[in-house]
Amino acid sequence: MTNINELLKEANELVPRISIEDAKALLEDINTVILDVREDQELRETGKIKGAIHVPRGLLEFIFRPEDYVDDEENMKILVYCAAGARAALAAKTLMDIGYKNVFNLGGFKEWVEGGGEIEVV
């Protein structure tokens, strides 16, 4: 039986962590999407990264449709964040497991804000 620590370790080993600066640069590419995998209440309380697509982690496989956001899925880059980075790592690994290639863990919303990233009220 696998526990959460083992799941997180595996996800963190497989999914590259991206810096705020590198994420900001990638967001200039029209084939980059940013996913907020937090729950609705968290978005209402803090807002979200400007331009982020909200897909709660538990619904990721069911409602994330990249063709709704980019024209070139083959070269799409996906940045994933949550409150602190754990759910983002697990969500990013799930995306890799179902076939997406350029997936990165951006970490936590607070890191983005502290790094001067733009946010928007939901």
Image (tube, rainbow, N blue to C red):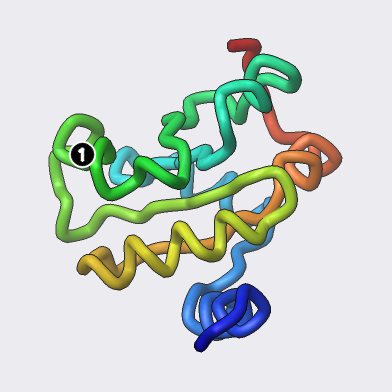
Up/down of 7 relative to 43, above or below: below
The quadrant holding residue 77 is: bottom left
Up/down of 95 relative to 114, above or below: below
**Number of marks:** 1
Q: Nearer the viewer, residue 26 or 6?
A: 6
What percent of the width, then of the height, locates residue 69? 24, 32
- As drawn, the residue found furthest toward the right would be 114
What percent of the width, then of the height, locates residue 16? 53, 73
Q: Residue at x 55, y 64 (%)?
A: 89
Secondary structure under badge 1? Answer: loop
Q: Residue at x 57, y 51 (%)?
A: 23
Q: Left or right of 31: which side holds 16?
A: right
Q: Residue at x 59, y 11 (%)?
A: 122
Q: Nearer the viewer, residue 68 or 75?
A: 68
What percent of the width, then of the height, locates residue 53? 42, 30
Tag 1: residue type? Arg
The quadrant holding residue 48 is: top right
Q: Please give the residue where the numbered disc 1 appears in the rendered image.
A: 65
Q: Left or right of 14: which side holds 24?
A: right
The quadrant holding residue 94 is: bottom left
Q: Nearer the viewer, residue 83 or 120?
A: 83
Q: Residue at x 48, y 31 (%)?
A: 52
Q: Is disc 1 surrounded by few (<14), some (14 to 19) or many (20+) residues within 10 Å?
A: few
